[in-house]
Amino acid sequence: MQYRTFGKLGIKGSAFGLGCMRFNGEPSGDSIINEEKAISLIRRAIDGGVTYLDTAYVYLNKTSETVLGKALRDGYRERVTIATKMPSGAVHDRASMEALLNEELRKLQTDHIDFYLMHGIDRKDWDYFKSIGAPQFFDDMKREGKIRYKCCSFHGSYDEFEYILNDYDWDMVQIQYNFMDINNQAGTKGLELAGEKGIPVVIMEGLLGGRLAKAPDNVQALYDAFPVKRTPVEWAFRWLCNHPQVATVLSGCNEMEQIEENLRIFDTVAPGIMSDEELKLMENVREAYLSRTKIGCTGCRYCMPCPNNVEIPRIFSMWNNAALYGSNPGVQGLRRLAEEGKSPESCVGCGACEAACPQHLPIIESLQTAWKELNG
């Protein structure tokens, strides 16, 4: 396992950070988590050298923190750092912030959280947090030892990111970044700005919700033609770790094979590891993906549940898969969605999904286009 310095903090952490959002294959789905399997995955990652574990209050129907707490018994807690998040939509004053933090500490079975994040904020969220005293709360909790580092995860534009980064003394920031998102959200400019300020950056959506793990034929042709052979996952992670500003790359794993593959990949990655020829390959890969992708949905499910039961991520996944891989969802599958009232035909345009989407996608319009094309 490669270990990297966390900017101005001076501490070291594993280049591979285990994301605890996708143990069931879905980041925040309705299925019940398989505790025994999840615990075995977590402990194997730690035994393989992983020291950074990322969860959140809302993940897996609010069960992720509990399962992680169980996995970190028997001496595992002392070997890792935990990152979890204050749920943005559930706090309205200091009392609620304290109650939620104490609940998270109980669920995680620990007396402190190493990296405590304001979850998924943009400028509007940050201004709201300031109005209810969240920055002072984070400062106080750090002094009391309940949290070690004051952090945030970010979804928004670069201008918003710059504003937030300059407005508070952050210890760490977490951003969505991958070779497809160089100009999206914080993007490369945001990564470099954080690096200039010595703020370590943790990466989420390094595989864009898994979409970069399986290459469509036009992308695979580029990989196959390159003299060095690597899997799409390895190319994506090597590209990220090539950036010296990156402290840890989060990867959510559902199967032991994925844990083992990541342990292998992150045993060799390092800043500056990619040659000019490899970087040019990734530019060509980006263009190949862009030529086929319908919508930049990562399947994060922040838009769910839909008030009218529309299966938004599922429909967008079918749409992208049809364009990228030529997969056909089938007439029966589409008909079943319609019969169950889960198709875009049930959308009333309330806008709740678009307000919640961290990608700021035009969901309402895109659903109608996707449904038309899938049925056409």
Image (spheres, rainbow, N blue to C red):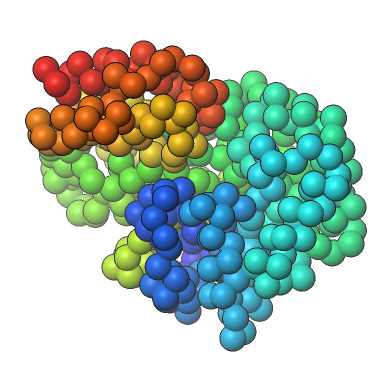
On screen, residue 148 versus residue 346, left or right, reads: right
Q: Above or below — where is 203 with respect to 146? A: above
Numbered label tally:
0
Q: Is residue 61 visible in this depiction of the protein?
A: yes
On screen, residue 139 versus residue 154, left or right, reads: right
Q: Residue furthest bottom?
A: 74
Q: Residue at x 33, y 25 (%)?
A: 295
Query: Quadrant of the rendered structure where residue 335 is?
Result: top left
Q: Residue at x 53, y 68 (%)?
A: 67
Name the one closer to the observer, 72 or 340: 340
Query: Quadrant of the rendered structure where residue 44 is?
Result: bottom left
On screen, residue 252 versus residue 231, left or right, reads: right
Name the spot of residue 176 as percent of width and height, x first.
51, 39
Name the spot of residue 319 as percent of width and height, x first.
23, 28
Q: Residue at x 84, y 34 (%)?
A: 132
Name the spot of residue 175 as percent of width and height, x first.
56, 40
On screen, residue 40 versus residue 155, left or right, reads: left
Name the spot of residue 135 as percent of width and height, x first.
84, 41
Q: Above or below — where is 244 with respect to 330? A: below
